[in-house]
Amino acid sequence: NAGVMQNPRHLVRRRGQEARLRCSPMKGHSHVYWYRQLPEEGLKFMVYLQKENIIDESGMPKERFSAEFPKEGPSILRIQQVVRGDSAAYFCASSPLGADYGYTFGSGTRLTVV
Amino acid sequence: KNEVEQSPQNLTAQEGEFITINCSYSVGISALHWLQQHPGGGIVSLFMLSSGKKKHGRLIATINIQEKHSSLHITASHPRDSAVYICAVTDQIGSNYQLIWGAGTKLIIKP
């Protein structure tokens, strides 16, 4: 029973490129949450998705960031035209029926923008 | 003042010692989470509590709703327990997935 799978583990992008981060939730989990951890800071909520729906994106920067969770396949967090300030660890978590049922976290993707 | 406060910020102990990490919060909550983040960065959810006490192996988590306080205990600590332990709560008022995070406690267990 694989846990939450995130890939890649490490991603290096030059300024202006696009970064695509993938998250496959645990089997049977239909709720996905993305968090960002900036260096020396705690995790910040970004977006909450269910299959084919964005439930809450109040933590997402208004520009350059987007997320999706298609009917088939992993959830994708996309960052367009990356800047140095986007360098962070991005964590995905999933839950079966909603956050009250507990989260399982992925190992994160470390994005470095050079 | 942060809504979730953890203490201590850093803790170094010898292998075998009993470890206690504290978490106090100032908001109404629907649940409190304890998570572990290893030096490699991965996050593991240890416990989710809304009342009482939970135990898993050498880890014990307790919560006192009236006092708005939770503790994470590690018995017979081992160097592999070295990690950052994070307390987070889900706010009764806000959305229950928007965790409010403590700053974490960095634990080092020396052999």
Image: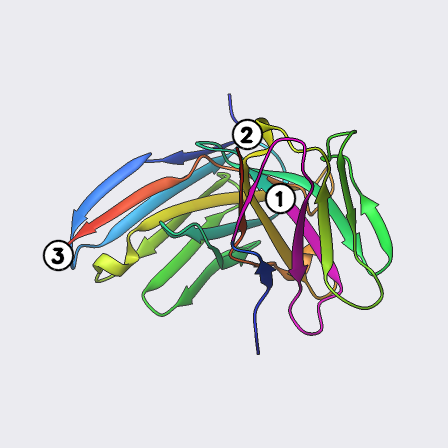
Of B88 and A35, the residue lying toward us: A35
Across and down, in percent, residue A43 comes to 55, 39
**Residues in magenta, as a range:** A10-34
Query: Mark 3 and mark 1, same subunit?
Result: no
Label total for image: 3
Q: Secondary structure at mark 1?
A: strand
Q: Secondary structure at mark 3?
A: loop
Quadrant for the N terminus of chain A in the image: bottom right
The residue where tag 2 is placed is B3
The amino acid on which the numbered mark 3 sits, given as a three-letter code, is: Pro
Is the Cβ of the residue at disc 2 closer than 8 Å to that at disc 3? no
How far apart marks 2 and 3 lie (CA) works out to: 35 Å
Write down the chain letter for disc 2: B
How far apart marks 1 and 2 lie (CA) works out to: 19 Å
The amino acid on which the numbered mark 2 sits, given as a three-letter code, is: Glu
Q: Residue at x 71, y 73 (%)?
A: A28
Q: Residue at x 66, y 56 (%)?
A: A22
How far apart marks 3 and 1 lie (CA) works out to: 34 Å
Look at the image and say whether residue A21 sits in the magenta stretch.
yes
Q: Judge depth for marks 3 and 1 and give the one in front.
A: 1
The residue where tag 3 is placed is B111
The residue where tag 1 is placed is A35
Q: Is residue A46 above or below residue A2?
A: above
Return the disc, 2 or 3, that comes first in the chain's sequence: 2
Q: Is residue A20 left or right of residue B64?
A: right
Q: Is residue A80 above or below residue A24?
A: above
Q: Is residue B77 visible?
A: no
Display colour scheme:
rainbow
